[in-house]
Image (tube, helix red, strand yellow):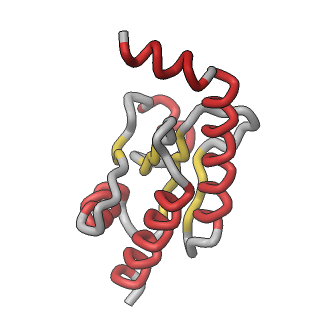
């Protein structure tokens, strides 16, 4: 189909490089957010950045940043045994795909800074 043709036209190596570049940028940008803790930072990981923010619950974060047009997932992500082992009930997850851009993580970082301003006031 069209999706397969699209992927083949770009090439899997180029898609993987793009994903890794965006992941690296996203981690760098989010590392600057006060109180943010990454969940999972293995080299060569897949296209997700999972985190907690010590100022707010993941569901509150997702709701607030949605108002700024930033979409993330919040919850246990069907990984309850892992969450229990990590001592958390849930986290926030931002996904990276072929359409992701560095600016997406700038918007996420800015939205998280706003969450901090609201909850740390």
> In which quarter of the view is residue 116 placed?
bottom left
The picture places residue 9, in percent across and down from the top left corner, at 55, 20
Which one is nearer the viewer's eye here, 107 or 18?
18
> In which quarter of the view is residue 61 placed?
bottom left
The quarter of the rendered structure image containing the C terminus is bottom left
The residue at the point 63 percent across, 21 percent down is 12
The residue at the point 72 percent across, 38 percent down is 42
The picture places residue 13, in percent across and down from the top left corner, at 69, 24
In the image, farthest residue toward the bottom: 121
The residue at the point 46 percent across, 14 percent down is 5
In the image, farthest residue toward the right: 43
- Relative to 107, does residue 99 appear above or below in the rendering? above
The picture places residue 104, in percent across and down from the top left corner, at 47, 58
- Relative to 19, does residue 57 appear above or below in the rendering? below
The picture places residue 119, in percent across and down from the top left corner, at 36, 80
- Relative to 61, does residue 21 appear above or below in the rendering? above
Left or right: 6 as drawn, with respect to 64? right
Which one is nearer the viewer's eye here, 1 or 63?
1
């Amino acid at each position: 189909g069209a999706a397969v043709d699209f992927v083949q036209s770009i090439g899997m190596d180029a898609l993987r490089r793009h994903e890794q570049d965006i992941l690296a940028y996203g981690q760098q940008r989010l590392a600057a957010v006060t109180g943010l803790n990454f969940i999972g930072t293995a080299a060569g990981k897949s296209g997700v950045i999972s985190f907690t923010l010590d100022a707010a619950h993941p569901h509150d974060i997702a709701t607030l940043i949605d108002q700024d047009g930033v979409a993330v997932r919040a919850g246990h992500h069907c990984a309850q045994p892992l969450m229990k082992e990590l001592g958390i009930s849930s986290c926030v997850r931002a996904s990276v795909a072929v359409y992701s851009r560095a600016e997406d993580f700038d918007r996420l970082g800015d939205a998280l800074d706003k969450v901090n301003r609201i909850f740390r006031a």
